[in-house]
Amino acid sequence: MLSKFFLDRPVFAWVIAIIIMTVGALAIHQMPISQYPPIAPPAIAIDAFFPGASAETVENTVTQIVEQKMTGLDDMLYLSGTSSSSGASRVELTFAAGTDPDLAWAKVQNKLQLALASLPDVVQRSGVQVSKSTRNWLLIPALISEDGSMDSSDLQDYAQSNLEKVLARIPGVGEVQSFGSQYAMRIWINPDKLTSYSLTFEDVITALRSYNVEVSAGQLGGTPAEEGQRLNAPIVVQHLLQTPEEFAEIPIRINQDGSAVRIKDVGRSELSIERSDSVVRSNGRPAAGMAVRQAAGANALETADAIKKKLEEMSKFFPPSVKVIYPYDTTPFTKVSIDEVIKTLFEAIILVFIIMYVFMGNIRATIIPTIAVPVVLLGTFAVLGFAGYTVNMLTMFAMVLAIGLLVDDAIVVVENVERIMSEEGLPPKEATAKSMDEITSALIGIGLVLSAVFGPMAFFPGSTGVLYRQFSVTLIAAMSFSVIVALILTPVLCASFLRPVKAGHEPSENAIFFMRPFFKVFEWCFGGIRNLYVRFVAFSLRTKFIFIVFYLLILALVGFLYQRMPTSYIPDEDQGMVLVQIMLPPGSTLEQTEQVMTKVRNYFLENEPEAVKNVMTISGRNFGGQGQNLAMSFVKLKDWEKRQRPDLKVKPIAGRAMAALSKIKEAKIFAFPPPPVIELGMANGFDFQLQDRGGLGHEP
């Protein structure tokens, strides 16, 4: 018998338990931490930019070409393309759940090579980016100038030049997206003057490419050198142009008489922001924002901490008055949620210990099931680590639920051993051996039944299956380790910890001397409750029909309430953030959009001062795409401890904002809390998309 084998070899049982705990402890440090499992199927995004092109031009010359080349990819479920009036093109390919993101990325890269030759030259020079990061933003660091000495353009240029590439190299970062662009030399051409010289824009572009180059002129005294050569030095003949004045002097055409038509003759040059397609503000002050996406499978908390640590180190070299803030950060809620579940886990362990001690009355007998708890939990973490799962709300909730279940097996062993010792007066080791002969099959049966209850959840299809599979596997692993510990370690503990007692021994006699009066009173009270229950059972057996009818009424009530209870995928929670999406009529300018954003920002700062900590507004793009008529805002709320009143929770705040902002007639404005799983979309409910399968076009 298994238990008898380990009773004779207690050190072997302890070695197995220590190995289980060691492997589990190592697995915890390697497991990613996230709010929920990776529910959304893996997606690969292809981004391109066609400066100056309309949305229709981008659609015809970039987006459709890329989409056509992506057909036929293995495991691809569907693809969607977005073309904006700002010249941006984005094609997102969604693959089947379980597809390796690295393999999918490589396949997309190979297919994209076939499309590059068909794209416009300017798009190829701008570069086409393929990313496999998660869909949702992990956090948004933003730079602000406290004294206003730097505007948004200065801040954005500094962020892209000095911070973006540094952040992109941090382990766990999948993509860094800037809300703006760097400084560039902007050439303004007067079409009338250009025509008067019989020149075209292509002539200007050709001249710029010809004169703004880095030329390699070789070396003086380079090998093979003549004998006696005394000097070796590189020859520098021309650098890239740096100032507007240098660009203004570029000749576009040399006339036969030796005169030249230069850039300054047909226009002007200035150092300006490359693309003025967005405006970023934090509480009304100029700001520069960078959205960071987490790499697939990365630890969200560790990645965010690494980003913040790196920015804190680099802040020593920031220009005066420049500081970094985090107007959007998903990690505080994740951290608080996980911390609360861990706190609940320890509270459950303490409560289980107290309840076991109260009912068992023996501190030694209580310690035995308590020792089983860390062994089982760490063993479960080892299984989760080998399965590639994460530490998330569902796995931790399964741990909390398993606390009460996993000690049951150990309690059954301990109570049966104590019963045999009390009734027959056997020493602990012999009583344990006899007890295990009686209950081994029952312990295995309990584990199999519980596994059979939770096992089917692991086979749910779709995103529901992904969500609850880790919950199911966690519980089954905990139940399995509970049975293993009850068969291997708990008998050894009983034989070692329990003291011999005489036949007819009362449990309260094992209690600490000053606790014995309490346990005598408790046993008397519990005995009275037990007697009442016995009489109630006897009464129910005499009046079976009444209780059967009562049971059927309960079933009917359950069915009635089930039909009327609201359903949801995952319950909404206060994540400390309100998202705002703004859309003006097509053709609206960025200036008009910024005027609406000022009203939105002022509403939150003036009407919700008790709840709102920071309002970041971004004009020129929203959660659906880019365009001068689009905007979005991240309203960061104060810590949960400062918002205890019900009216300061996120849902009432969003509701009041919707009612107030709907009065702004210039735009459609939606204020809403972040969804529980941002990877599935920026709002709850379902997506509705109208497909033009008849090829009728956009025109009415």
Image (spheres, rainbow, N blue to C red):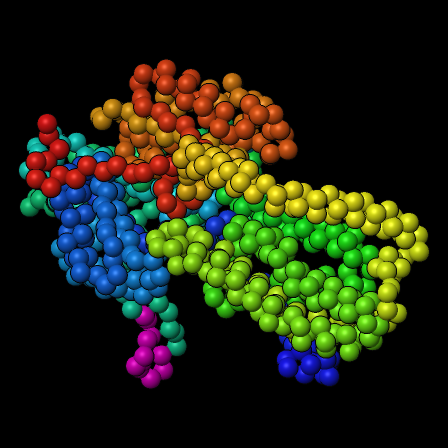
Residue at 39% over, 50% down: 464
Task: Let me know if residue 663 is in the magenta part.
Answer: no
Rendering quarter of residue 642: top right
Residue at 81% over, 64% down: 364
Report x, y in % for residue 386: 50, 68
- Residue 22 is left or right of residue 297, and the answer is right
Q: Quadrant of the N terminus?
A: bottom right
- Residue 693 is left or right of residue 245, and the answer is left
- Residue 413 is left or right of residue 150, and the answer is right
Judge whether residue 152 can be spotted in this image: no
Front in this rendered view, residue 212 or 695: 695
- Judged by its main secondary structure, the magenta piece is loop
Front in this rendered view, residue 633 or 163: 633
Q: Which residues are magenta?
A: 219-229
Residue extending furthest toward the front: 542
Report x, y in % for residue 547: 56, 40
Front in this rendered view, residue 570 or 338: 570
**Image: 670 above or below 41:** above
Front in this rendered view, residue 593 or 378: 378
